[in-house]
């Protein structure tokens, strides 16, 4: 049994942001996540730091929130962001009908933007459709959501917070009040008490609310995305039209992420992409970047948005839902939902203000001004990183981009494990020892291990060896982690074709012959 002032259910970007905000105010808090941090919608998205332009016409409140938070995050979370800028491009004459309202919406909602000539757009991005009719530069960027979440958690831990991952949580109710949560972890049940429980479970918000007898109109909305093997644009590219399927391309490290779709689902669990969604996304991508038709699909994935209110998936607001359920007769229970990854910090501030007031805590929010770990100071020189870890300049640059001023805090271990994503032995050890990783799938989220061209085929066994040789895991534990990693990689085989399908099938045969490792559900 343990006692806290606040317990947060949900270890995505909003939950981690709340944990950090409250810890900086001196509120003793516990975050509970049923899987790994950012393992659901917070890690299954474009990785787009919105400028607000996408919502400038149809959702002005969300546009203003994104525009303001974009500037703040570029200040406090530099090490998680590549400040690419973005282009909205009109590919057809009918798109020009949207241009005037788009420009007015951006101006009205203080979204940084600039109309540029077609010639300038093509000079910036030579692989754009040469037939584009108009272009507008906006303040978009790409962001690493996994590092963002882990950085928030690290900051919170430094300020006295606690976390539990891989723990199922269920709120406890007594006499019309939520008194804490009961967790189930590794078959062991434990009770944790608190004055307030915050429901920050995204698409599962309505499900958790029902557990305490509260009804919320949260509508889980599936979005599918496609990862391509090559990066041919340095800007985020958006289709200049009202928000629709497949109209965004985000450069992300050495890949590009295309999407997304919008489909309501009954159950947000175990969502997988479908071939029809992939085909539509690729078709739309080709319209903006014709070279996409020659790119290889590395993988696809689906996340689930927590939408609320009326309207179709595209028409539904991306605004913020904050509910104090005491007004409905359920004390000690607060829900925060909706929003965007870009607005997570604002969402955390709003719910932390409410909770602090209820607790009588007077400290103010500091998250808009205090940098996250990794963005707190000047990052080391590349030469220092190269020398410490005996790696090449490309890998050193990758480490500095991901960890900023914390780059030299990793253990002094030499060697490169994942050549596609430039993941070093030191990084993998660092993830287990300092970044709360429990298995190789967690390491993947923190480092991009196995996210490159080989999709883990030639590196995951090396990473498993690191677990045994450097971290004292048993061989059976490392093999279990390796098998779970591969199972995750292989479950999208139904949407692959061509070279990528052949590569996956070859990997299956290779691991079966060498290690007797098969995809879950296949007979041995």
Image: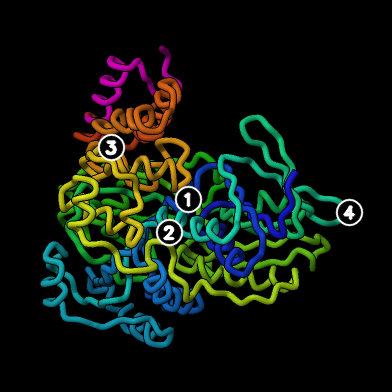
Residue underneath mark 2: 148
Local SS, label 2:
helix
The mark total stands at 4
Q: Are marks 1 and 2 in contact (CB under 8 Å)?
A: yes
Circle nearer the viewer, 1 or 2? 2
Q: Are marks 4 and 2 in contact (CB under 8 Å)?
A: no
Query: How dense is the environment of label 4, judged by Cα within 10 Å: few (below 14), some, or many (20 and up)?
Result: few
Residue underneath mark 4: 175
Residue 376 vertical position relative to residue 113 in the rendered view, above or below? above
Of residue 75 and residue 201, the one placed in the foreground of this image is 75
Nearest to N terminus: mark 2 or mark 3: 2
Q: Are marks 1 and 3 in contact (CB under 8 Å)?
A: no
Can the viewer see residue 39 in this picture?
yes
Looking at the image, what colour scheme do you see?
rainbow
Local SS, label 3:
loop
Nearest to N terminus: mark 1 or mark 2: 1
Split into 4 quadrants, where in the image is the N terminus?
Answer: top right
Query: How dense is the environment of label 2, judged by Cα within 10 Å: few (below 14), some, or many (20 and up)?
Result: many
Residue underneath mark 3: 455
Please state the horizontal and vertical placement of residue 386, each as a whole percent of the image: 19, 51
Over which residues does the magenta segment extend? 503-524
Split into 4 quadrants, where in the image is the C terminus?
Answer: top left
Circle nearer the viewer, 4 or 2? 2
Residue underneath mark 1: 38
Question: Spatial distance from mark 4 to mark 1, Cα to Cα?
Answer: 34 Å
Of residue 370 and residue 120, the one placed in the foreground of this image is 370
Residue 407 vertical position relative to residue 318 in the rendered view, above or below? above
Give me the residue at 25% from left, 78% from top.
136
Query: In the image, 286: left or right of 352?
Result: left
Residue 521 within the magenta-colored segment of the rendering: yes
């Amino acid at each position: 049994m343990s006692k806290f002032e606040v317990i947060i259910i949900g270890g995505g970007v909003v939950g981690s942001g709340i944990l950090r905000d409250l810890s900086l105010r001196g509120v003793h808090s516990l975050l509970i996540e049923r899987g790994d941090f950012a393992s659901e919608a917070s890690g299954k998205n474009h990785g787009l730091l919105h400028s607000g332009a996408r919502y400038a016409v149809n959702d002005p409140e969300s546009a203003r929130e994104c525009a303001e938070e974009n500037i703040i995050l570029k200040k406090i979370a530099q090490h998680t962001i590549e400040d690419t800028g973005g282009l909205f491009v009109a590919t057809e004459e009918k798109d020009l009908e949207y241009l005037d309202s788009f420009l007015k919406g951006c101006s009205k909602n203080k979204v940084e933007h600039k109309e540029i000539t077609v010639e300038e757009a093509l000079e910036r991005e030579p692989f754009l459709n040469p037939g584009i009719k108009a272009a507008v530069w906006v303040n978009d960027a790409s962001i690493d959501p996994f590092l963002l979440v882990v950085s928030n958690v690290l900051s919170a831990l430094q300020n006295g917070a606690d976390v539990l991952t891989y723990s199922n949580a269920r709120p406890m109710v007594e006499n019309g009040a939520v008194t804490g949560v009961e967790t189930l972890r590794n078959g062991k049940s434990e009770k944790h008490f608190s004055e307030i429980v915050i429901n920050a479970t995204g698409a599962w918000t309505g499900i958790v609310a029902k557990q305490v007898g509260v009804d919320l109109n949260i509508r889980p909305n599936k979005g599918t995305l496609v990862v391509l093997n090559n990066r041919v644009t340095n800007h985020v590219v958006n289709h200049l039209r009202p928000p629709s399927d497949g109209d965004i391309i985000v450069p992300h490290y050495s890949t590009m992420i295309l999407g997304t779709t919008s489909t309501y689902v009954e159950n947000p669990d175990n969502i997988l992409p479908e071939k029809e969604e992939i085909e539509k996304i690729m078709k739309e991508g080709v319209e903006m970047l014709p070279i996409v038709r020659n790119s290889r699909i590395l993988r696809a994935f689906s996340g689930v948005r927590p939408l609320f209110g009326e309207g179709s998936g595209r028409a539904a607001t991306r605004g913020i839902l904050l509910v104090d359920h005491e007004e409905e007769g359920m004390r000690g229970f607060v829900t925060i939902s909706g929003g965007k990854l870009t607005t997570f910090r604002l969402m955390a501030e709003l719910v932390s203000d409410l909770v602090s007031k209820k607790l009588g805590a007077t400290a103010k929010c500091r998250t808009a001004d205090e940098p996250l770990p990794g963005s707190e100071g000047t990052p080391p020189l590349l030469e220092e990183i190269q020398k410490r870890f005996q790696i090449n300049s490309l890998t050193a640059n990758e480490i500095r981009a991901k960890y900023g001023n914390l780059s030299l805090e990793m253990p002094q271990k030499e060697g490169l494990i994942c050549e596609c994503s430039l993941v070093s032995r030191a990084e993998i050890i660092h993830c287990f020892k300092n970044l709360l990783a429990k298995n190789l799938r967690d390491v993947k989220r923190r480092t991009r291990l196995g996210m490159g061209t080989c999709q883990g085929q030639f590196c995951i066994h090396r990473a498993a060896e690191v677990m045994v040789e450097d971290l004292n895991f048993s061989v059976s534990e490392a093999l279990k982690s390796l098998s779970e990693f591969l199972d995750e990689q292989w479950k999208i085989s139904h949407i692959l074709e061509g070279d990528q399908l052949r590569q996956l099938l070859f990997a299956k045969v290779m691991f079966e012959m060498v290690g007797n490792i098969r995809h879950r559900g296949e007979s041995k």
